[in-house]
Amino acid sequence: MEKTRPVLSISMLVSNNRRDTIEKCMESLVPLMNAVPSELIIVDTGCTDGSVDIARKYADKVVRFTWCKDFSAARNAGLFECTGEWFLYLDDDEWFEDVSELIAFFRGEERKHYDTLWYIQRNYNDFEGTAYSDSYVGRCVKRTSQTKFCGKIHEWLEPLPQRIKQVDSFVHHYGYVFKTEEDRKKHLERNLSLEEAAVKENPEDIRMCCQLVQEYRSAKRFEDAERFAKQTLQQTKYEKTNSFVQYLLITLPKIYMEAEEIEKALAEYERLLNEEVLLHQSKLAIYCERAFLYGRENREKEAAEESLRYLEEYGIVPGKEEPQEFPIMDFEQYRSKFNRQRVIKGGITSAMLSKEYGYLGRLFAGLDWAHDTEISKEMVKALVQCYLFSKDESLLLRELERVLKVETLRMPVYAILHSAYVEFSERRPELAEVLEQLNRRDGNFGFFHLINTEEKGITTEQDIADYYEKSDRKYDVEVAELFLKGCERKLSGFGTLETGMTAEATVKEYILWAKRYEEALRGTGERADEDEQEQLPVIQLARMLEEVLAEPDLAVCGEKLKQVVALYPVMLPVAKALLAEKEVAILAGQLKTMARNLLIEGKTEEAKTVLSELAMLVPGDEEVKELLI
């Protein structure tokens, strides 16, 4: 029986020093390969550290390749073994966050109407993953008999595709982060030697010339980068509108920026806009880079104005048609949602610092509130601050309507708004009116009030009662989680935190919120299985503590507390305090009995002596106070 042709062929080079990433890479592909008829071809370039053995577990075929300092030759060795309708290649130091968009594309009819699928490569600047940049990469194409890799390094696929589909799926890539400076230099030296050799072999290949300029920039050889970029521009036979010529034009001011020649960079950007023929993507790059540069130089008004120029060129102005252009090398990043959000965020910050409030309406209008929750939360704060300073009620109301349509933002937005309500309602009664309208429209305002008060440590019993009595109880799970975290902090810090509560009272509060959490989970259908709920550490601990409080025998109580501490070592200070309190309670009970008997026998003075000792032992005991009278 003839084997069915796969929809997708995936190929990957495997090298040394990738054991920490290759498993992540392979696992990220499993959902895609399970959902779409696929084949995985691994190219072993001389791996000796076992990385290829990890990849082999997932691969359909492993191709051995003798390394010859030519990435295209190695890539083609894998490509020529592929049989799929589409072809995707990856590096062994990157992995997909989510492949659902890729699955939808390959399982649908859409793949028949495109030549290439572009996804995002997220390039990290540190191993913590806190700093990164996003750019589109065209590493997935419809395979033809002419499809092949070109270029010794930073290889690319030809023929160049024309019909491009872009998705928001992205790969994590740490290939530009190095453990030591020596590793970085070794990597740069290897790349530079390959690039220089490639340009020497074919000096008219403008793409290779562009890549050599990029390598000079990475190596911080800015004079070499400037010299070679200008030389290539002077000698090239291509038109100014060629995408690689455009890349070199826009790269010159970036070289000056990297060399800290700020005024020279700004002058070159101005010259380009006034004197050169620029593509739409090149203008986007200029406005974006100038916006960031002005912001860095604290030229806030100019930064805000440049952000608006970027948005206008981006196509935020209704009716503006975007020209069809072949993507410039690395310039598609300027059209990514991630980049647009960054530009708008910077523009809003700059407009507020420069008090150019008139710019803010257009800047906020460009925000995609649903795209990035963290940026959106920052921008909600900026929106409220903007209103308080500019008194532009229409902007606040318009944007609030947009924001509150994003379900994931509703909780943080209400918390921010309620905080503003508390702080500014007297000075800004119109803001108070807006938030009171939100209060009436949404029965969960009490929940956001709890977030605000709990954050400040001023929640009252009445605040909690108001939530349970007046809201529609939509956020019961979140409320219980909120207060459980507070209880856990008290438990873990018992003995060092000034809570003003006994161990027993602290434990009782924890048990109360654990029960409410359990009830809330059952009410929403989450973890509805009671056996599964019993396994939750929060509920398991509460059950054990309930047994401890109910146990009258001190010795048994001590054994139960040992079990608690064995499972939850953080409970040791609480357990000691709880056991001491129980010992005091037992002693107090015995002394009370003695005092009562003495009173019955008419030995009043002896009884008062015992009760006085009791009053010092348990100062808040009401029964002792009554007996003393």
Image (cartoon, rainbow, N blue to C red):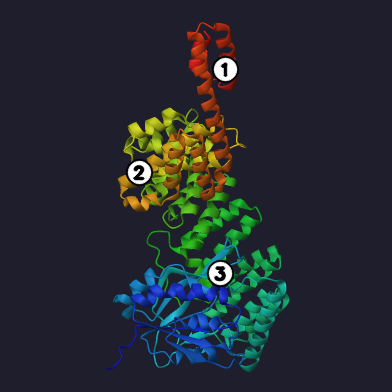
- Reading the chain from its start, which is encountered first: label 1 or label 2? 2
Measured along the vertical axis of the image, is residue 220 above or below residue 479?
below
Checking the image for residue 456, the label placed there is none
Q: Are marks 1 and 3 in contact (CB under 8 Å)?
A: no
What amino acid type is highlighted by mark number 2?
Answer: Ala
In front here: 255 or 196? 196
Q: Position of residue 147 (x, y in %)?
A: 44, 90
What amino acid type is highlighted by mark number 3?
Answer: Asn
| Mark 1 and mark 2: Cα distance apart in space | 42 Å
- Report whether residue 228 is seen: yes
- Reading the chain from its start, which is encountered first: label 2 or label 3? 3
Corner quadrant of residue 501 = top right
Looking at the image, residue 13 sits to the left or right of residue 39; the answer is: right
Which residue sits at x=56%, y=80%? 245
Of tags 1 and 2, the one toward the viewer is 1
In front here: 588 or 231? 588
Residue under pointer 2: 520
Measured along the vertical axis of the image, is residue 311 above or below residue 361?
below
Residue under pointer 3: 123
Circle 2 — which element?
helix
| Mark 1 and mark 3: Cα distance apart in space | 68 Å
